[in-house]
Amino acid sequence: MPKLMITMSIPAIVSMLIQALYNVVDSIFVSRISENALTAVSLAYPIQMVIIALCVGTGAGISSTISRKLGEKENDFASKTANHGLIITVIYSIIMFLAGLFFIKYVVNIFTDNAELQDLTLQYISIILIFSFGRFIAQAGQSTLQATGDTIHPMEAMIAGAVLNIILDPILIFGYFGLPALGVKGAAIATVIAQIFSMIFITLILFRKKHQVEINLKNFKFDKKVTKEIYKVGLPAIVMQAIGSFMISGLNLILIGFSSTAVAVLGVYFKLQSFVFMPVFGLCQGFMPIIGYNYGAKNKERMLESYKIATYIALFFMIAGTIIFKLFPRNLMILFNSSPEMADIGVSALSKISWCFPLAALGIISSTAFQSMGYGMNSLISSIIRQLVILLPCAYILSKFIQIDGVWYSFIISELISISVILPWLIVTFKREFNKWNIQDNDKKLSA
C-alpha cells in the first residue's frame, strides 16, 4: 500500500506543485506593475474560485464514480462517466463565456468602488472567464485518467502548461520581444494560453491511447443514472469549493475596511499557502481512486491502510509548511515587492494562520475519504461549518475587538472546531459501512 500510494500520488503532487508555482509566479510578476495590480488580482481570485469549484468538484465526482465502478467491475458505466464528464465541462465553458461577456462587471463592482481597481480586476477576470474552456476540459480529462490509475499523463499536461505560463508571463505583462506591455491583461492571457495547451495535450492522450475506459462522443446521450452518480459526489464538492469563493469574498470585504493593502496580503497568503496545500490535494488525487476502488471491492483493510498512510503524508507536508511560514514570513513577503506596510501585515498573517495547517491536513484527508465512498454531502456539511458557520462570523467579530489580527486568528479557531466534527463522523461512517458488509457476507454464507 505505501508503494501504491506513492506511485499514484507523486505525479499528482508534482502537478499541483507546478500549478502552485505558476499561480505564485503570476502574482510576483503582477506585483512588479503596482500594488493596485496585485490587489486587483486578489479581488479577482474569489471569482476564479467559481471556475476552480466547478473543475475540482466535478472532477471529484468523475474520479470517484469511475474508480468505484471499476472496483465493482462495471467498466461500461465507468466509460459512460468519462464521456459525460467531458460534455458537462463543455456546458460549463459556455456558461462562463457568457458570464465573462455580459455579467462580470456587475460582480466586480460589489468588491470595490475604486475605479482603477475595478478596471484592473475586470481586465484580468473577463479573459479568464471567456477562455475558461481550456481549464474545464483539461480537468475532465485529468480526472478520468487519474481514476484509472494513470497519473503520469495528467502530470505531464500540467507541467507543460505551467512552464508555458511562466515563460509567457513576463513577455506579455512587460512587453518583451517587440510585443506591447499588457499588464494584468497579459497575465490573464498567459494563463488561458497555458490552460488551452494543457487541454490539447490531455485530449490527445484521451482519444489516441487505450485506457480502462472508452472515450466515444459520436452518439452521446445524457444518462440520468450516470449524471446522478457524478453529482452525488460532484455537487457537494462544487458547493464546498464555491463556499471558499464566498468565504474569501467575505474576508476581502472585512479587510478592505482596514485597507486595500490588507486585501493584497490575503491574496498573497492564498498564493503562498497553495505551495503547502497543493501537494496535499495532489496526494488526495492519488488517494481517492485507491480508497474508492477498495470501497467498491469491499476491502476494509486496504481502505483503512490507505487512509492512515495518506494522513501521515499530509501531516508531513503541513508541518513543513508551518515551519517555513513561521521562520521566513518576511522573506516570503519580499517576493511580492511589498511595501513596509504590506510586509508588516503579511508577516503577522503568515505566522499566525500557519498554526492551522496540521489541523487542515486531517480535515482534507477525511473529506476526501467521504467523497471516495460517495458521501459528498458529508464533506459539504463539514466545509460549511468551517468556512461559513465559524470562520466568517468569527473573523468579523474578532476584527471588531482585536483589529486585523482577529481575522488571522479566526482561521485557527475554525479548523479546531471543524476537525472535532469531521473525525468522529468519519469513524462512525467507517464502522457503519464495515458492519453492513459483515452482515451481507453472513447472509451469503447462510444462503449458501
Image (spheres, rainbow, N blue to C red):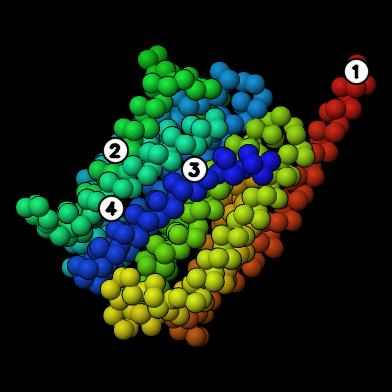
Residue visible at 12% across and 56% down? 175
Report helix, strand or loop for mark 2: helix
Report helix, strand or loop for mark 3: helix
Residue visible at 33% across and 75% down? 334
Mark 1 Cα shell of 10 Å, populated few (<14), some (14-19), many (≥20): few
**Quadrant assignment for the C terminus:** top right
Q: Position of residue 155 (x, y in %)?
A: 43, 41
Task: Measure the C-alpha gap from mark 4 to mark 1.
Answer: 63 Å
Mark 3 Cα shell of 10 Å, populated few (<14), some (14-19), many (≥20): many
Q: Position of residue 109 (x, y in %)?
A: 26, 62
Three-letter code for the amino acid on which mark 4 is drawn: Ile
Question: What residue is pinned by disc 2?
Answer: 197
Task: Measure the C-alpha gap from mark 2 to mark 4.
Answer: 13 Å
Q: Nearer the viewer, mark 2 or mark 1?
A: 2
Question: What residue is pinned by disc 1?
Answer: 447
Tell me which label, 2 or 1, sits earlier in the chain.
2
